[in-house]
Image: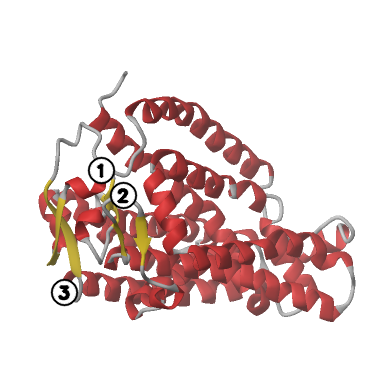
Amino acid sequence: MLFDYMTLKVIWWCFVGVLIIGFALTDGFDFGVGMSLPFLGRNDTERRVIINTIGPTWEGNQTWFIAAGGCLFAAWPLVYGAAFSGFYIALMLLLFALFFRPVGFDYRSKIADPRWRNSWDWALFTGGFVPPLIFGIAFGNLLQGVPFHYDDTMRMEYTGNFFTLLNPFGLLAGVLSVAMLAMHGATFLQQKTVGAIAERARRMAVAAAAVSIAAFAAAGLWVAYGMDGYRITAMPDVNTAFMPVAKTVVRASGAWLDNYSRWPATIALPAAAFLAALAVIVLSLSRRTLGAFLASGVAVAAIILTAGAAMFPFVMPSSLAPGSSLTAWDAVASHKSLGVMFWVVVVMLPIIIMYTTWVYSVVRGKVTVEDIHANEHTAY
């Protein structure tokens, strides 16, 4: 085997992180564009312009979501099982919200009835707003700990319900998720449109960036001073296979800041998130649209990395029995499985990146009202 077990565990933490960030950066602006549709498009033609900015690429962007889900199942099977048990209703809401997107894109403009099209516009809004909200709420609950534990036969029992997810910090994390992807979608629209739509998108980008900064700062202060984190105090050799309950975990105030003390360079992550979001405001106001979009991408990636760096190696902490918490050391598949899948990712990930880059190079350029009129029956 090329790598020892511990190294593969760390590599797979990084792989899952890359896939989550890839999903947020690509499908994230699709969500942002979708949730802006009823507000930035003042008439049917303008809304068609907005839809067609992401029309050629939104399906391909979902590759990252599918790949992340597949890797979660293959690399962290215990996390996959626990997540679908604990977040089952939330995940079903997520999937049903995602259903609106393909049918909305394909059917919205088939009938020239204002009521028909307006209904699909709000369906596309739902498909853009609900998934980021659920992702954010779920991640906020991961930082607090999920109410599950393993019994003596290693069967997992979840004692919470859907409404326990809707706690204040979970909702704050949901607001941050929605705001940062609204910012990302608005900066994308600035870059892809002209005239009145671009101006409205500029104002939305500035407002969403400001909300992102405020929500990120509030969440950071809450994590640092108002919430117990998790800390491993004893466990078997990380280069071996062991069950989650074999380790000892304690909850302690400020424990989520341990990694920032251990590796001071990681402080650059939250700093980059704040600076990039501020850059979105400055660049949007100065109408430097490409720079604003790139800064938005940096902000989104840095926010995700900030949370990931704080939690490492925890993946799903348990609020009921901290020793049952799932981590990168004990929730993983076998050494051989991780090794085989490593080569699959090494081959497939560059292919995904290359064809995504090629597609965006083909469809580069702005979408205008004239384009919609010239392609009345072929455009979305």
Identify the amino acid type marked 2: Met
Q: Earlier in the sequence, mark 2 or mark 3?
A: 2
The dot on residue 225 is 3
Mark 3 element type: helix
Left or right of 31 on screen, residue 312? left
Residue to which mark 2 is pinned? 154
Residue 244 image point, x, y percent: 25, 47
In the image, residue 156 above or below residue 360: below
Left or right of 51 on screen, residue 312? left
* Residue shown at 61% from the left, 73% from the top: 36
Q: Earlier in the sequence, mark 3 or mark 1?
A: 3
Residue to which mark 1 is pinned? 243
Q: Earlier in the sequence, mark 2 or mark 1?
A: 2
Report the Cα–Cα distance between label 2 and label 1.
Answer: 9 Å
The dot on residue 232 is none
Between residue 178 and residue 148, name the one nearer to us. Answer: 148
* Residue shown at 88% from the left, 77% from the top: 113
Contact between marks 2 and 1 (CB within 8 A): the answer is: yes
Left or right of 15 on screen, residue 363? right
- Disc 3 crowd rating (10 Å Cα; few below 14, some 14-19, many 20+) is few
